[in-house]
Image (cartoon, rainbow, N blue to C red):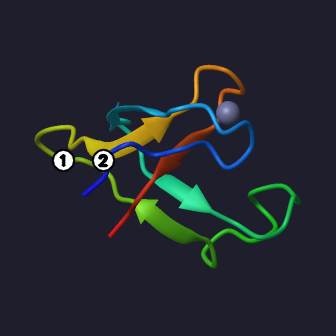
Amino acid sequence: MNDNVICPECSNELKQGYIFSPRRICWSESADSIFADFGSEEVLINDAFLKISKTPAFRCEKCNLVIFKHK
Ligand SMILES: [Zn+2]
C-alpha cells in the first residue's frame, strides 16, 4: 500500500497533517454572501464544544492546496 498522496495540481508529494478549527467549517456551492444561503449550507466539520477535534488532512506546500476528508 502506498501512503504517499500526490497533489492533483502539481504532482508534488502532499504532506500529511491535521486541520482544526474552533468554529465549524461549511461548504457552499455558491459564491454569494453567507447570508444568502444561511441555513442551507452543508457543515463539513462541526463546532467543537469541549475539545477541538482535528481532521486528518493533506497539504501541498507548493500550491497551497489542502485536501481533507470529512465525515
Ligand atoms: Zn500542488
The picture places residue 43, in percent across and down from the top left corner, at 48, 66
Q: Give the alpha-carbon distance from disc 2 to disc 1, as whole Å.
A: 32 Å
Residue at image location 66% in from the left, 39% down from the top: 11
Quick one: 19 or 5, which is closer to the camera?
Answer: 5
Which secondary structure lies at badge 1? loop
In the displayed structure, does residue 32 sit left or right of residue 5? right
Residue at image location 72% in from the left, 27% down from the top: 63
Residue furthest bottom in the image:
40
Quadrant containing the N terminus is bottom left
Quick one: 54 or 9, which is closer to the camera?
Answer: 9
Ligand 1 within 8 Å of disc 2? The answer is no
Q: Amino acid at mark 2?
A: Asp
> Dot 2: few (<14), some (14–19), or many (≥20) neighbours within 10 Å?
few
Tell me which numbered mark, 2 or 1, is placed earlier along the sequence. 2
Residue that carries the numbered disc 1 in the rendered image: 49
The image quadrant that residue 65 belongs to is top right
Residue at image location 67% in from the left, 50% down from the top: 8
Q: Nearer the viewer, mark 2 or mark 1?
A: 2
